[in-house]
Image (cartoon, grey):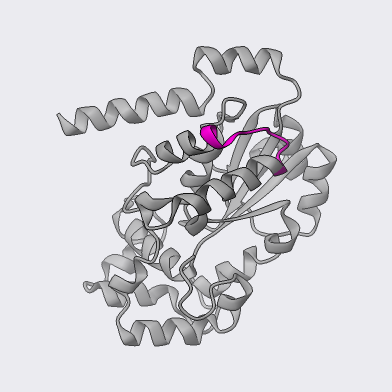
Amino acid sequence: MASIGGSVSKALWDVRRFGLTPSKLVRRVHDPGAPRVFCVSIPKAGTHLLERALCLHPELYRKLIPTVIPRNVERWGGMEGLARRIRPGQVVVSHIKWDPAHPRVLQAAGVHTVFLVRDPRDIVVSYTHYATSDKDHRFRQQYLDREELEDRLRIMLKEDATERGPSIARLLDQFAGWLDGAEVVVRFEDLIGSAGGGDEETQRATLARLFGALGLETDPAFLSALGAKLFSSSSPTFRRGAMGGWRQDFDPETEARFNAAVGDRLDRYGYGGHHDG
């Protein structure tokens, strides 16, 4: 019964997030002033949490396309073609690496940009579990070849960021430009709320800042109600969804290797020391 309930919950969420509910269908026709939104995140940084926050707003819904990545963006004519295709109220989710041309293209098309960041140590943990379990993941065999979790976690901790295979240092470098180039930067830890180990006041303030930057009016009651619905397992890639989980999985050697591989990149992203929020 639990699996049936979960399937129903995900199906209902798909109807809502893709704007197929009656109220959102009406808004799609009668609300030409709704914002166009392009979201960027490093893989496994909590992409679907940001998507859920945006698509729970009555004026926003996800455009019916898969997550945009470098390998598929040409399907829509590159960034320029994609930007032109984003309609009022639509949200596009992506893992597009930084390029100085991207903000200019998106801004010219009237598209807002939101960059989601997360503690890179938690990204390593989430990526490792995902790569191990996803049958279609291109690096899965590298992970399956190692039996222990500690050994799997260390696959991403290459000090030489040019070495083949997944590298947290390389990912941080490839996306760092969005820290200054995006219109809004949102922290996973500030968005997750008390259900994921954060706090509700920070969550409400973050939602208010996010929607405010998009030109959407909100009120405290709405933000509280939205926040209560935000933490959910309805995401197709949901595993644990909590902040600071890396502390349970990093042993001292793994942490030392992480620090050597990442260096001052942790400070660049605002997670220096052992800051979780």
* 96 to 152, vertically: above or below: above
Magenta segment, which residues? 213-222
Q: Residue at x 39, y 44 (%)?
A: 231
Which image quadrant: the N terminus? top left
The answer to whether residue 248 of the structure is visible from this angle is yes
Instruction: Give residue 240's position: percent from left, percent from top.
Output: 32, 53
Instruction: Give residue 39's position: percent from left, percent from top.
Output: 62, 46
Left or right: 225 in relation to 8: right
Q: How many marks?
A: 0
* 147 to 92, vertically: above or below: below
Q: Residue at x 63, y 71 (%)?
A: 173
Q: Quadrant of residue 215?
A: top right
Q: Residue at x 53, y 32 (%)?
A: 222
Instruction: Give residue 158's position: percent from left, percent from top.
Output: 47, 80
Q: Quadrant of residue 116?
A: bottom right
Residue 165 forms part of the magenta stretch: no
* 137 to 235, vertically: above or below: below
